[in-house]
Amino acid sequence: MALNKPTASGIYLSVLALTVKDRQKAVLCRRITDEDELLQNPEARERKTKEGKIVHEEYYDSIDALILGFTIKDATFNGEHIPKASWLVKMKDTSTGTDYILQLPYSSGFSKTFLNALAWIAKNKPNAFSKPLRVRPWMMQDEKDKEKYWRGISVYLPPYTKEEKVAKLYDKEQMPAAVPARYKGKDVWDDEEQMLWWEHKVFDQITPAIQAVAGEVAFDLVPGGMPADQQDQIEAAGERTYPDDLPF
């Protein structure tokens, strides 16, 4: 997959849940804000956000790219500061030289399955980080509860056949459990301890394995963080139009 018009800091992608024929589908999303590009781009699609804002986006099933590094980003959404809102994953399309920054909700099936696959690579095939990996988000409707969707990201090694789908390294019994909690009057799952455990895996295990083959890569965001039009990208990346699938 190659996208056009890279910026100095890379093209921002997020994972978005779309409704297609009354079912949820996960796609990679690039939001388009440049009016000239929008006029020349027949692939751009119009969508209304939960807040009623009209946005224009491109959707992709997957991306083939090097995984280069991670950071964690706070966000402000509807005036509320949200610490640790997203993982930002730096990636590079070696066929075009284009840099990408993939944004994933910090605590979600998307991020946890992705990190679990990368943990498997770090332990079993660390040299695989020297080649582009295929990253494909997915959503699957629960057979018993049609309002519930399981979601995640699959990672494939070259040549990206189903036989090269990366396994998970950790079962849920091997990680801290999410616990029931109340938040703003609602029953939720508190997975803070589990996410701190994942941070340890990312920065102490996965990142060193990547650096061993790719070298240390600076996370060169533009000054002040994301581009201004991406500051509330949590809305695009984590627009919760479906129930959470915790606990893991």
Image: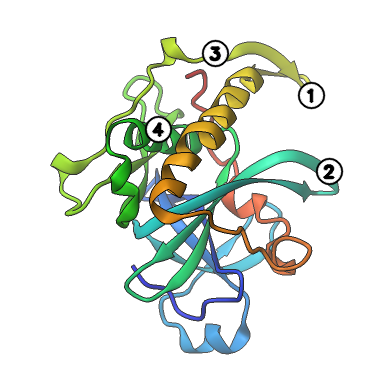
Where does label 1 land, which residue?
A: 184
Disc 1 residue type (three-letter): Lys
- Camera-side residue of 83 and 137: 83
- Camera-side residue of 236 and 19: 236
Q: Is residue 126 left or right of residue 233?
A: left
Task: Return the disc, 4 or 1, that comes first in the chain's sequence.
Answer: 4
Disc 4 residue type (three-letter): Ala
**Residue drawn where x is 37% and y is 76% of the image:** 96
The secondary structure type at the circle numbered 3 is: loop
Where does label 3 land, which residue?
A: 176
Where does label 4 land, which residue?
A: 119
Task: Return the disc, 4 or 3, that comes first in the chain's sequence.
Answer: 4
The secondary structure type at the circle numbered 1 is: loop
Task: Return the disc, 1 or 3, that comes first in the chain's sequence.
Answer: 3
Task: Single out the mark in the foreground, 1 or 3.
Answer: 3
Where does label 2 land, which residue?
A: 80
